[in-house]
Amino acid sequence: MSRTILRYAALTIGAIAMVGPFVWMVLTSVTGDTQLGRVDAPLLPDPATVDPYARLGDAFPFWRFAANSIGVAVASTLLQLFTSATAAYAFSRLRFRGSNLVFLLYLATMMIPMQVIIVPLFIEMRYLGLVDSYAGLLLPTVVSSFGVFMLRQAFMALPKELDEAAYVDGAGHVRVFAQVLLPLVAPALATFAVFAFMSSWNAFLWPLVIAQTEAHMTLPVGLSLLQGRYSTAWNVVMAGSTVSVLPILALYVFAQRYVVRGITFTGIKS
C-alpha cells in the first residue's frame, strides 16, 4: 500500500513539473500589462485578456515566421521520411561489404552535437551560396541518423519470407520496398514523422545562424526578437509561444495511437 502511495505521489510530482511551465505560459499570455511584474499580482489573471494575442501581428511579422516554420518543418519531415526509409531498407535488407561498419559510422554521427559542426556547416553553406535561403535552412536537416536507426529496427522486425515471396512473383527491390514492406512499418513512419516535425519546428540554433533577414526567419527565432533591450512584453512572448505549441499538440493528438504502436513495434522506449 505504501509503495502504491509513493508511486502515485512521484507520478503526481512529475506531472506537475511537466505541465506546470505550460500552465504558467498560458496564464501569462492572458495577463494584462498592468499586472505584469507586480509583486502583489493574483495567481490567476484578473481580468484575463486576449489583448497579447491581438498584438502578436503588430509586435513582429508573426504570420510570416509561422508560415516559414510550417513550410520548413513539413518539407524537412517529408525529406527525412524518404531518406531514412530508403537507407533503413538498404541497411536491413541488402547485404554488401562493410554494411555494418557504414551503419555504425552512421550511428556515430548521433553523438556529435550541432554546436560542434555549426561553423564548418555555415562555411559550407556560404560557399554554396545558400546563406539566408530556404535551401540553407532545409539542407542540413534532410538526413536523420536517428530515423535510419528507428526505421531499420522496424524493417528488421519483418520476416524475410515476405521479401522472398515478392521476389518469386517477379518484384524488384523498389516494389518490395514500396508495396510490401513500407505499408507494414506505417506506425514507425508515423512515430518518426512526429519526432522529425517536432525537432524541425523547435529548431533554434541553425535557423538563428543561417537566416539573416526576417524573410527567412522561423517562429522560434522570431519570438526571440521580442525580447527588448530594457523591457520585454512577456505576455506577448508567452502568447506567441502558446500559439507555436498548437501545431505540435494537434499533430501529436492526431498521431498518438500511431506513436504508441510505433514505439511498441520498434522496441524503442526512450
Image (cartoon, rainbow, N blue to C red):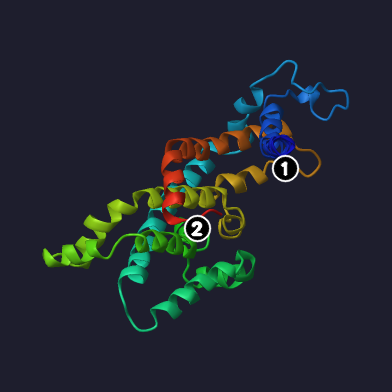
Above-or-below relation of 183 to 95: above
Image location of residue 168, percent across then percent down:
13, 67
Which residue is at a point 49% across and 50% down the rendered structure image?
195
Image location of residue 11, percent across then percent down:
68, 38
Question: Which residue sits furthest front?
Answer: 1
Which residue is at a point 61% across and 32% down the rendered structure image?
56
Does residue 267 appear left or right of residue 186 in this picture?
right
Which residue is at a point 26% across and 61% down the rendered structure image?
177
Does residue 235 appear left or right of residue 85 in this picture?
right
Above-or-below relation of 248 to 186: above
Which disc, if any, is residue 227? Answer: 1
Which disc, if any, is residue 170? Answer: none
Above-or-below relation of 136 to 55: below
In the picture, which quadrant includes the N terminus? top right
CA gap, disc 1 and disc 2: 23 Å
Say what secondary structure mark 1 lies in.
loop
Which disc, if any, is residue 137? Answer: 2
In the picture, which quadrant includes the C terminus? bottom right
Callout 1: 10 Å neighbours few (<14), some, many (20+)? few
Residue 65 visible? The answer is yes
Which residue is at a point 11% across and 63% down the rendered structure image?
169
Image location of residue 206, percent across then percent down:
58, 59
